[in-house]
Amino acid sequence: MRIGISVAMIIMMLGLALALNAFTTYAITNQMKVLSDLNIPVSQEITRMYAIQQMQQHSISDMVTYQKMSSNTNYEISKSQFESYNQEWDYEIKKIKDLIDTFLNYGLDSGTARNLSILSTNLNEIESAHLQYVQRADQIFETYYGNTNNLNSVVTGLEAQQNQIILKTILLNDEAQKLTDSLNAGVDESKQKAFTWQLIIITSAGIMSLALGYFLNLINKDLVREVIRKTRSLQKANKKLEKMNILKDDFINIASHELKSPLHPIYGFVELAQNGDIGADEALAGISKQARQLEEIANRILDISRIDNGSLYLSYEKFDLSNMLLEITSSQGLNLDGKIKIETSLEKGISIEADRVRIGQVVRNLLNNALKFTEEGTIRVIVRYNLQKNLVEVTIRDCGPGIHPEILPKLFNKFITKGPKTESWKGNGLGLYLSREIINAHGGHIFAHNNKEAGATFKFTIPIMRHLNAIELHEKIMN
Amino acid sequence: MGLHILAADDNEFAGLQYKKVFEKHQHDITIAKDGEACVEAYKKKLYENRSDVDPFNVVLLDFVMPKKNGVRVAKEILELRPHQKIIFVSAFGNGILDDASVFLKDDVEIIQKPFSLEFLVNKIESIHALRNIR
């Protein structure tokens, strides 16, 4: 952005300098043209006018002389000479006027135009003065033809008029000279002005270039910094990917281990049954149990990949959570021996809206964990409803050894309790990860902590109703 | 003459099967359901005997077990009896157990799951025979 603007401005300024240059050249050319096409001819014409005037004067004085001498022939020659000078004069005047008129429409600067119009006015004056002079002369020649006696005073008057014309011509010449001077001065001024402007523009362009260079340098530094930053973040991302890859490898290893483990006893049962070491019924019962375990592991791995793909869909239904907990805790599937007791404290009569199967999975998983780690004692299961907050809270508290402090912060991660390189605990390391994901998918939370006395407490909360605000919920329950 | 075997496996059926097949071959077998129980059983037998011989002819260990994993159990046992014969039973592929190979020596080996129970019995019997020849 900044570069773009700077470059644009520099180009603009250089363009301006060029345009100014062209404009100045045009102006100077124009003035030079006026000088050469108008001024020089005008000066020449004026000189000629002056010369003609002089000659007219001579022809008049010749005529007077010839009149006095009564030399008619010479007189006539001088008279016609005077007339021819007259024509020449008119011709010269016309030439100057034409030149001036042409250039007045030329579009000149005001000074030159004013000078020209002064010139024109003076010329007009001279012309009319000359016209009078010629008329007077003609009159004299006509009237006093052959009579030379009273001619002297008239000739003297004529001479005065002539002198006036000559004076005016000289003035005209001065004006023409002034025009020349002012045109020359204009050229000089134009040159000077153009030079100054060009200097200013080029200097500004230079400053802009410097600024541009500075900005480019800054931007370059920014870019370098950016590249370093990006490289670092890429390195970080790469490391993360490497880590994830390792995790993935671990997942595959552990998953295949978990799938292979129940197979081994199946082969064992087959072998023992074939050798007749155990009865077929016993073998089949064992095999079927291992097969069920395999199925469970396969399902969990499937669930995990669904979660990782973001395709874990909940099918919501209304059910009584307390009843469900009662069913699970009193079911035979938990294999309670006499040493472990389950105590329940369940608020009743409220239906929740959730995925019944998935929530059952979570409850079973948490209960099985509690049972696994409790050698003997009581496991407490508590359900509390918070209608104001639209939340149900399920607590499962055991009195086992508690959770290892190193494990606790990452308890709900995948395979945290599992693996060939880590200390391992019971289970396949997927249950709590799955539980957390299921609860999170419901918009709930799950957490665990060690009890002050003994054992660990797992707790999860989920919304009672999915799309209900607390007031509506309250009304619904009240009715 | 029967051998004394200590087997640790958290799969109750696997333990049961070891028991069946080794007892069928007239061997004496102790089953532990996790790593901790295994170490305890080993120590108990060791102190009962109060002699310079290994308390068991062979210790069978699963890698992945609750409370203490197989590697840790093996380390603890080898601290007590550096030449105790230990066989790891693994459902992992090769390669993942690189860490374990650090302490692998002649007295420790790994066999891959699955294997037949008779194969295991034969292997243990032949190991014992070899040791006696030495």
Image (spheres, coloured by chain):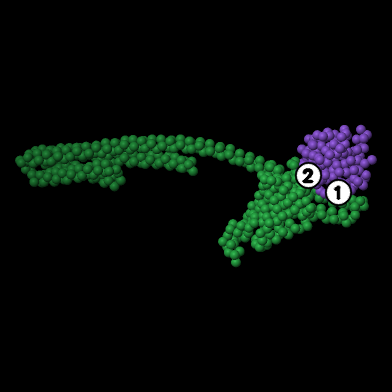
Percent across and percent down for residue A132 are 14, 45
Residue A393 showing in the rendered view: yes
Residue farthest toward the left in the current orientation of the protein: A149
Percent across and percent down for residue B19 are 88, 47
Label annotation for residue B65: 2
Q: In this rendering, would B101 be left or right of A103?
A: right
In the foreground, B112 or A343 = A343
Question: Chain coloured purple: which letter?
Answer: B
Amino acid at dot 2: Met
Question: Chain coloured green: which letter?
Answer: A
User: Contact (CB < 8 A) between labels 1 and 2?
Assistant: no
Q: Is residue B71 above or below residue A334?
A: above
Q: Chain of mark 1?
A: B
Mark 1, residue position? B16
Under tag 1, what secondary structure?
helix
The quarter in which the C terminus of chain A is drawn is: bottom right
In whole angstroms, how far apart are the C-alphas of marks 1 and 2?
16 Å
Q: Earlier in the sequence, mark 1 or mark 2?
A: 1
Q: Chain of mark 2?
A: B
Q: In which image quadrant can residue B46 be found?
A: top right
